């Protein structure tokens, strides 16, 4: 793979398209137009890629609490992963989107949460793939039978109770991943209440990539998180637990492995 763990280049993926132990997943999505990603996929996608939808596959239905994108039902997503050929702990999954990892990193995090560490994101995403001139198709691949039996890594996630009881402890850092104007409560385009969880520090998720949608270097990632490297525990949240996963990916690349996702995030916090 490439020198960066958790990430593959478009060149690497092109050279491995025929690998039988590889499954590519298109995660393109638009919060404003929930069907857009699937429509884009049907028009053209990386050869052999399957499509997983943020709302339908990578989340479960919304309830009173739990946020706008509650974690998916493990059995249901496991069935879907089995149907697209993902053998537990064997198949390498490469996820991509066209939103600076916003949705691909959600799948990356979910697979690791399910105990499947063979997962990477495509650096630069679909845009980089297209600009490199690599093949795109509208052919939907047939389902491939595999066996995916998740083993949940429950220490990777925290709920509102854990956040409330531990966020103010010395050694614990609570990271808000949203854009700074949402963190500051100046603008709130999605949720009913503006602001942030008391005590949270702001590390906007868009800062870990450059303007082209490629990840910044591992050195830059380490520098970006340098003030957090000695933290005992890190809880990461965003609006609904999706773009926080971009920061979790960045933290892993930076060599900081103790960060946990507050899955319900701000939309869960304000529901109480």
Image (cartoon, grey):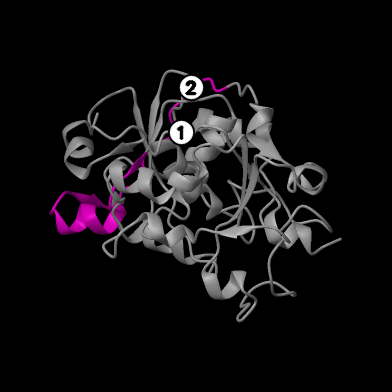
Q: Residue drawn 59% across and 29% down? A: 114
Looking at the picture, how far across and down is residue 182, in whole percent? 59, 73
Q: Is residue 143 visible?
A: yes
Q: Position of residue 95 (x, y in %)?
A: 39, 42
**SS type, badge 1:** loop
Q: Nearer the viewer, residue 255 or 52?
A: 255
Mark number, residue 84: 1
Residues packed near mark 1 inside 10 Å, few (<14), some (14 to 19) or many (20 plus):
many
First in sequence: mark 1 vs mark 2: 1
Q: Are marks 1 and 2 in contact (CB under 8 Å)?
A: yes
Classify mark 2: helix, strand or loop: loop
Percent x, y of residue 214:
28, 54
Work out which residue is located at the far right of the displayed protein and give it: 272
Quarter residue 249 falls in: top left
Residue at left 74%, top 42%?
169
Q: Give the residue at x 47% y 24%.
A: 145
Query: Which residues are the magenta region?
Result: 121-148
Q: Position of residue 229 (x, y in %)?
A: 49, 39
């Amino acid at each position: 793979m490439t020198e960066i763990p958790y990430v593959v280049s478009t060149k690497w993926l092109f050279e491995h398209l025929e690998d039988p132990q590889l499954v590519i997943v298109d995660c393109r999505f638009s919060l404003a137009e929930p069907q857009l990603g699937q429509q884009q996929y049907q028009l053209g996608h990386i050869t052999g890629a399957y499509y997983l939808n943020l709302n339908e596959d990578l989340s479960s239905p919304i309830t009173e609490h739990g946020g706008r994108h509650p974690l998916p039902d493990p059995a249901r997503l496991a069935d879907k992963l089995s149907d697209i050929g993902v053998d537990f702990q064997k198949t390498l999954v490469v996820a991509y989107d066209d939103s600076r990892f916003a949705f691909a990193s959600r799948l990356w995090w979910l697979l690791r949460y399910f105990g499947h560490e063979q997962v990477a994101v495509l650096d630069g995403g679909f845009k980089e793939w297209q600009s490199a001139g690599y093949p795109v198709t509208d052919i939907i691949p047939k389902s491939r039978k595999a066996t995916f039996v998740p083993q949940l890594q429950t220490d990777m996630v925290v709920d509102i109770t854990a956040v409330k009881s531990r966020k103010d402890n010395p050694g614990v850092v609570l990271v808000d991943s949203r854009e700074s104007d949402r963190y500051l409560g100046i603008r709130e385009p999605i949720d009913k209440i503006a602001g942030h969880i008391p005590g949270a520090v702001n590390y906007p998720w868009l800062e870990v990539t450059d303007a082209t949608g490629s990840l910044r270097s591992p050195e830059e990632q380490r520098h970006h998180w340098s003030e957090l490297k000695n933290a005992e525990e890190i809880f990461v949240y965003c609006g609904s637990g999706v773009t926080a996963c971009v920061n979790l990916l960045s933290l892993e690349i930076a060599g900081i492995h103790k960060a946990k996702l507050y899955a319900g995030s701000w939309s869960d916090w304000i529901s109480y």
